Amino acid sequence: MLCLAPPAKASGFHIDEQDARATGRAGAAVASTNNASAIYYNSAGIARLSGVRVDVGTALVRPSAEFTSAVDGSETSADTRTFVLPQAFVSWRASDMFAVGIGVPIGMLAGYAGG
């Protein structure tokens, strides 16, 4: 069975840009929660927020990838397309002891799963 497996052709991306402030801090946003995107970075952070907070945004991503085989020198490249990746986060602190939130990170709203 192992000899019959087709070669894998895959590439993936991790997109961590869920909030402009966190991106500007190079992702160092775990201890600093100022908006509902804390649901993504550190969900316990919504306990520090007050009232209802809504954070929506989008990112434009245009990935490209190329590969040159060390065996035969053949080149393979991925199609270059631009993706619009929206995100949305909502949190509500009902009392000093209760906060709730929901978040849909980049790509999930668009139904984009990398293909």
Image (spheres, helix red, strand yellow):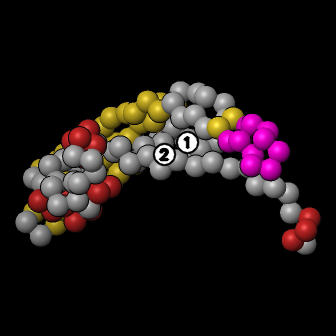
State which quadrant residue 30 falls in.
bottom left
The kind of residue on which mark 2 rests is Met
Residue position for label 2 = 108
- The answer to whether residue 55 is seen in the rendering is no
Where residue 111 is drawn, which disc sits there?
1
**Overall secondary structure of the magenta section:** loop
Left or right, residue 84 beside residue 10: left
Q: Do tag 1 and tag 2 residues touch (Cβ < 8 Å)?
A: yes
Q: Is residue 102 left or right of residue 3?
A: left
Secondary structure under the numbered disc 1 in the rendered image? loop
Q: Position of residue 78 (x, y in %)?
A: 67, 35
Element type where label 2 sits in the image = loop
- State which quadrant residue 56 falls in: top left
Quarter of the image with the N terminus in it: bottom right
Q: Position of residue 68 (x, y in %)?
A: 71, 42
Residue farthest bottom in this picture? 1
Q: Is residue 33 visible?
A: yes
Residue 87 lies in magenta, yes or no? Answer: no
Q: Say which residue appears at 66% left-offset and 30% top-offset.
A: 79
Give the Cα separation between the discs numbered 1 and 2: 5 Å
Q: Amino acid at mark 1?
A: Gly
Q: How many marks?
A: 2
- The magenta segment is 67-76
Pick the front one: 39 or 30: 30
